Image (tube, grey):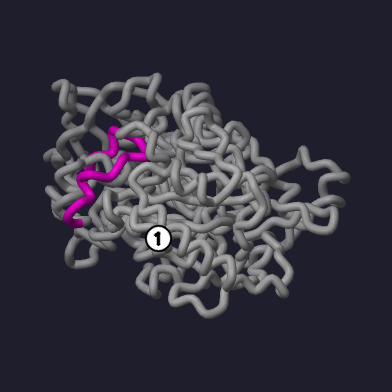
Amino acid sequence: MHSFDVIVLGGGNAGLCAALAARESGARVALLERAPEQLKGGNSAHTGGAFRVAYHGNDDLRVLMPDLLDSELENSDFGSYSQDDFFGELAAMSQYRADPEVLDTVVTQSLDTLRWMTTKGVRFMPIYGRQAFKVDGKYKFWGGLTVEVSGGGLGLVDALSRRAQQDGVELFYGVRAKRLNRCGDGRWQVLAANGEVFAAPAVIVATGGFHANLRWRAQYLGPGWDLAKVRGSRFNTGDGIQMALDIGAAAHGNWSGCHAVFYDLNAPAMGDIDLLNMQKNYFHLGVVVNAEGRRFVDEGEDFRNYTYSGMGEKVLRQPGGVAWQIFDQHSEQLLPDEYRVRQATRIQADSLEELAGKLEGINARALLQTLDQYNAAVRTDIPFNPAIRDGRCTEGLSLPKSNWANPLSKPPFVAYAVTCGITFTFGGLQVDSQAQVLDEQGEAIDGLYAAGELVGNLYYVKYAGGAGLTSGSVLGRLAGAGAAARSDEWQRA
């Protein structure tokens, strides 16, 4: 049996932050990761590395990004993102079901936690490529997101893993935890699928949700979800959730909800760390139609950061589970790199009639009618501005486009075939504001903590881009410190 002070299950952002915080407090830490080392990082490695953080202005951002040049500050409008804005947006998007104490902890500790991460080797930078448009000669950031990690999700995982090794965290790759037991001496035992046994006074569960569990998806998300492509890690099958439930933890949150996006039709069925950037999230700049040639979403309802996570569900409900995003030269040059990967299903034509004829499986006549009606409905008298909710809308359509409406009139025209790609599930475990796992009576389970996507307190119905990595870091750090303190108490007893 391997004995430690703290055991962390899961090697993504949340688990690594937990391990580093526990080690910082002097604990002997083991981190068990189900994946082999070459596929480490969980869902974190599959992200773009964006962090949603509350900040007052340039001074706060410069603490996180000391490499910012004076010229960058002069040519950029970073604005501010207050704690009230952060809290209010996530609370509203959850339809006020999110745990206010846990959400408040994430919001108020977001800046300090990211600052702490910089001391662990994480390098932050502005999201110029995906979250800023140049307006009147100045980059304008939008949608509450300004900060990402250098190197994206893989860069984040590499930086934290490297620091964990340097600090003496023992990393066990290819070890799948299967069961939790309470020992007679009060410690937890973690039983692995390979027969190894680990013991510690405190355990932190950070194994992600169940998006890669086909059976659970069909059971909890509903019919058809077993057909969705998996955007994230193939190893997130709900193991940590099941282990915690088996020893009395409370199931909590939106178990029938998930984060799922428009995903390239040509993407692999399972997330591939060597083939990222297959999502198609800038639909708000174009028009989206289904196989019947009809629009089925208000593409400009809000900034894509606040709507993109629900688009996977919407396309999954369409005939054949497929749709097309259509752009012309008003907006194609504004599309980020995810639209330029070699594997993208990109179709181009010099006229809408030619484009309709090239889209396999679509009702071309209905499509042309839809686009004619859309083009005629655009309020071209309202200025187009992609950096704000510009109010440039359609008028007279049963399904409006509320912002960023441009007529599709400037060739060449391009279309991207998309389907549903599931990123992570919302349901999981209930934790308190110190990341302690709660039982069905609402009491903390002694020595058991959780962080990351399996926390069921935060996301209901909708998800705001960048919130996941931030909440994982904040709660992971708290879990690590709490677990180390619990281990000290156990040893003194």
Residue at (45% x, 34% y) in the render: 45
Q: Which residues are magenta?
A: 222-238
Q: Main secondary structure of the magenta part?
A: loop
197 or 25: nearer the viewer:
197
62 or 372: nearer the viewer:
372
The answer to which image quadrant residue 145 occupies is: bottom right
Image coordinates for residue 169, horizontal then vertical, percent: 42, 26
| Quadrant holding the N terminus | top left
Q: Is residue 229 magenta?
A: yes
What secondary structure is found at the residue carrying circle 1?
A: helix
Binning the other alpha carbons within 10 Å of mark 1 as few (below 14), some (14 to 19) or many (20 upward) gives some
399 sits left or right of 125 in the view? left
Image coordinates for residue 12, horizontal then vertical, percent: 41, 36
Residue labelled with disc 1: 366
Amino acid under disc 1: Ala
Q: Is residue 393 magenta?
A: no
The answer to which image quadrant residue 159 occupies is: top right
Residue at (53% x, 64% y) in the render: 372
When the figure is inspected, residue 367 is found, relative to residue 48, above or below; the finding is below
360 sits left or right of 280 in the view? left
386 or 483: nearer the viewer:
386
Residue at (26% x, 40% y) in the render: 212
Residue 23 in sight in this render: no
